[in-house]
Amino acid sequence: MLFGKIKSIPLPQIVRMIGEKSGVLEIKSPENTLYSFRFSRRLFLGAKKQDMPIEDTFELKSMLLELSQKEESFFIFKEIELQEDNVSFSLPAVQLIIASLHSLRAMYQKNLPIFFPDPETVFLSTGNDPSWIGSEFFSFWIEAEPFFSKGSSAKELAKYLPFELEDILFHLYTLRLLNMIKTASKKRTFYLPISDQADLNSIEPHHTNLHLGSDSPATGSKPPPLPSESSTTAIQIYRSDQQDIKKGLLRRLIYGFKSFFRKMYE
């Protein structure tokens, strides 16, 4: 069973952890508002707010934006078999990840940067098709992909690309969740136990391919499948990774101060 606080694990990472499982993700806000999301084998089937079905993407975006402001909310995932009939959406779960990332980006939660990778962690391209990820992430990908083909870190990318370090870390965090890049070493720098093994199973093409981000995907493109995740609780993850998070934060602070003083004397 997966449970914890949104503050401990953001919604995009929760969806990533659900992976191939089928069931219902319930999120209860401090005001006792209940939000629920239904999943079946890497498909997002639909959502509800207080038992009222979310009928379209506009309502869904609004609900995700609302949830991004309620980081003290408690979540629990109940694993049960669900049927794919009479559903509101039926789209790849990775598109819900993109939509929730856009909501987090809009609000830029104070705690989100603690989930970013270490600036010195080296990433490699997984070779997956990037055409479905939307223009915001795609424009960064076009700039960074030549570096990922050989392996590069956020610290290195900041020297050559027209992006601030914090923006680069956000994009690396996003691309890692979407299985576009992987770590180049065995060192685990992410907050969650994300596997680097690419899963070659694909989602059947007859499912609706909607994009909930700021832009529509290329026609005929589909996202790569997410790697399977180990079943664990958010509390266990939180306790086991505190040291890694502190090290990553300290390195980013040191790098930030170096960049600040370097610019002062230029």
Image (cartoon, rainbow, N blue to C red):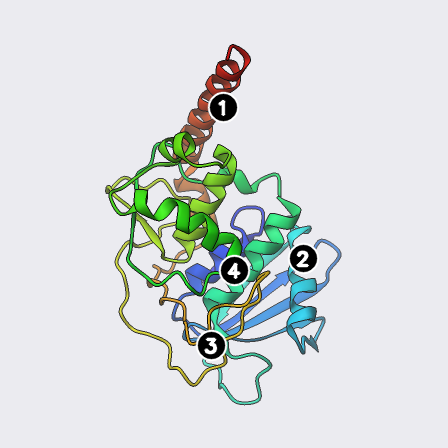
Disc 4 on helix, strand or loop? helix
139 relative position to 72: left or right: left
| Residue drawn at 66 percent across, 47 percent down | 107
| Residue drawn at 45 percent across, 48 percent down | 140
Quarter residue 25 falls in: bottom right
Disc 2 on helix, strand or loop? helix
Amino acid type, callout 1? Gly
Vertical order, 85 against 182 (above or below)? below
Which numbered circle lies on residue 65?
2
The residue most toward the top is: 265
Q: Nearer the viewer, mark 2 or mark 1?
A: 1
Mark 4 lies on residue: 98
Query: Disc 1 or 3, which lies upstream in sequence?
Result: 3
71 relative position to 138: left or right: right
Determine if residue 209 is in view: yes
Query: Disc 3 or 4, which lies upstream in sequence?
Result: 3
> Spatial distance from mark 2 to mark 3, Cα to Cα?
27 Å
Query: CB under 8 Å between callouts 3 and 4?
Result: no
Residue 63 percent coordinates (x, y): 68, 63
> Spatial distance from mark 1 to mark 3, Cα to Cα?
45 Å
Amino acid type, callout 3? Ile
How packed is label 1: few (under 14 Cα within 10 Å), some, or many (20 or more)? some
Which numbered circle lies on residue 256?
1
Amino acid type, callout 2? Leu
Query: CB under 8 Å between callouts 4 and 2?
Result: no
